[in-house]
Amino acid sequence: MTEMPSADLPEGVESPLDAALTARDRRVLDMVRAAVRHDEAVLAYQPVMQARAPHRVAFYEGLVRVLDPTGRVIPAKDFMPLVEDTALGRELDCAALRMGLATLAAFPDLRLSLNMSARSIGYAKWRRTLDEGLAGAPTAGERLILEITETSAMTVPELVIDFMDDLQSHGIAFALDDFGAGVTAFRYFKDFFFDAVKIDGQFIRGIDSDPGNQVLTKALVSIARHFDMFVVAESVERPEEAAFLSGIGVDCLQGYLFAAPTVRPPWLAVPPDRAIA
């Protein structure tokens, strides 16, 4: 087979593949921008279950989604990598926080976790949204968990530590998301005072038959326990995984074994004063 020559493109000219990817990314950004502008972001809720059988809901995670022009729900994996480090990402954090606080205000038996970027800490609109939401629902702070990914937390660790210290005095809890997947510097870890860690799914899938994942997950659980942190395992998809994780002392389990995220959570089927979290 004759090898095709690799022609150099003129400076400033994209290859057809690069052009296609750029156009796709532009379409995604336009879709997210329109969803934020027209208040078409929504939360999809996934239960986080107690690890010990019988499994009961410990709390729910609210995951931000956007609607495309046809009304189809678009998952975060399809847009978040493009917007997470932008002003648009901050606007999505504000939208998720606003919706989450409204849900906590409407359903006083509910406990809810929401994702945020460390970059939103200094975003005035995000903090204003939080303060207004807490003022309108005095018990919401005690039922709110803010999740910050390991990678995001390490971008500005000192700022995250001060931020957590401030908000924990209001009863808000914090979870370190994707624990084990990022680059946590353990010289900071002891200063963070996270209330919980969520072990990244890459260590959980197939853990019942994967000795390497078993060793690594046990080590992560041990670290969390040393710092008195609650432990959640993400991406649990099989009963065998759930059984192993329960056996090593994981507190809660989250994943498709129990339920997929849904924009129609169970509490919407009953009046707010009768909702069960």
Image (spheres, rainbow, N blue to C red):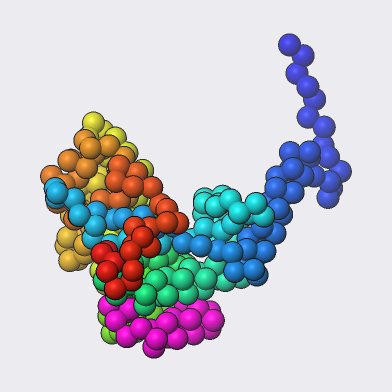
- Residue 121: x and y in percent read 47, 77
Residue 181 located within the stretch drawn in magenta = no
Residue sitting at 32 percent across and 85 percent down? 138
- Residue 150: x and y in percent read 39, 60
Q: Looking at the image, can residue 20 be seen?
A: yes
Taking 186 as reference, is 192 above or below it? below
Residue 184 shown left or right of residue 222 in the figure: right
Residue 28, quarter of picture: bottom right
Q: Main SS of the magenta segment?
A: helix
Residue 68 shown left or right of residue 274 in the figure: right
Taking 145 as reference, is 66 above or below it? above
Residue sitting at 54 percent across and 81 percent down? 125
* Of 159 and 125, the residue lying toward us: 125
Residue 113, quarter of picture: bottom left
Q: Looking at the image, can residue 168 be seen?
A: no
Magenta residues (range): 121-143
Residue 211, quarter of picture: top left
Residue 163 shown left or right of residue 275 in the figure: right
Residue 142 located within the stretch drawn in magenta = yes
Q: In which quarter of the image is the C terminus?
A: bottom left
* Of 138 and 91, the residue lying toward us: 138
Q: Residue furthest right?
A: 10
Q: Quadrant of the N terminus?
A: top right
* Of 201 and 243, the residue lying toward us: 243
- Residue 235: x and y in percent read 34, 45
- Residue 197: x and y in percent read 28, 60
Q: Across the whole image, how many numbered discs are drawn on residues?
A: 0
Residue sitting at 17 percent across and 41 percent down? 243
